[in-house]
Amino acid sequence: MTYDDANMLSAFLIYIVGAASPGLGNMTIATTAIRQGRPSGFAVMAGVMAAGQTWALLAAFGLSSVLVAMPTAMMAVGVAGGGYLVWLAWKTFRQWKPSTGPTRDQEAGQNGARIGLAGHFRRGFLIQILNPKASVGWILIITAGVRPESPWYAPLVIVLGCLVLGLCIFSAYVLLFSSRVLNREEVANSTGFRYALAAVYGLSGLWLIVDSLKVSA
């Protein structure tokens, strides 16, 4: 194994750990697959990956470092991302609020149909693109895999390699959480699952807002 190969392997391992670890992106992929099935799960996955690859290319060309060096810009991204997560929490809570209208299953199905695959893609994209920590993560990956003596194409190899790894990891999430091994209807309709999801979105959003304001202070 050459020196460059070892560096790239380090970058890939960092990506694998980050992508496979619990986070907002894969949590949203998993919960969407549970609630609304495989196509919706893959749509969210496509959005998360599209945003991730956007950050990856920015990091590969050094633009993420410029953004990170601008506290005001990072604060704006973080506050916008936190606000979006808080809005998702509120929407999730309202969606499952008991009512005398349609049953919860019917309501969830109607909401899923109304959102559509494009809406799921947009939700996954916004969750990932409005997370400034994603840019920092990609800077770490590129820094670990690329050295001054590395060939010019090394950053692009890392980005493409991580794209393949991400497709494998996130597809596994969709397939697992949309499979019949899990009782999807029972999980999706449980009160604990519903309010836990709203709480995770809300607390994550508030933390992101506070953290962004604190860093920029």
Image (spheres, helix red, strand yellow):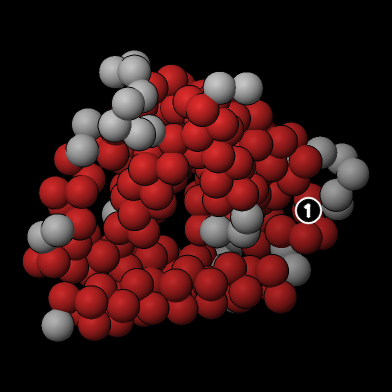
User: Which residue corresponds to the image point at 78% horizontal and 60% vertical from the top-left?
Assistant: 187
Q: Nearer the viewer, residue 53 or 112?
A: 53
User: Which residue corresponds to the image point at 62% horizontal and 74% vertical from the top-left?
Assistant: 196
User: Which residue corresponds to the image point at 34% horizontal and 46% vertical from the top-left?
Assistant: 139
Residue 41 versus residue 199 in the image, above or below: above
Q: Nearer the viewer, residue 201 or 37?
A: 201
Residue picked out by circle 1 = 185
**Quadrant housing residue 121:** top left
* Percent of width and height locating residue 3: 51, 28
Quadrant occupied by the N terminus: top right
Residue 65 versus residue 76 in the image, above or below: above
In the picture provided, is 152 more to the left or to the right than 39? Answer: left
**Quadrant housing residue 69:** bottom left
Q: 10 Å neighbourhood of mark 1: few (<14), some, or many (≥20)?
A: few
Quadrant occupied by the C terminus: bottom left
* Percent of width and height locating residue 182: 85, 49
User: Which residue corresponds to the image point at 38% horizontal and 33% vertical from the top-left?
Assistant: 146
In the picture provided, is 112 more to the left or to the right than 133? Answer: right
In the picture provided, is 187 more to the left or to the right than 98? Answer: right
* Percent of width and height locating residue 124: 43, 45
Residue 153 versus residue 47 in the image, above or below: above
Q: Nearer the viewer, residue 1 or 122?
A: 1
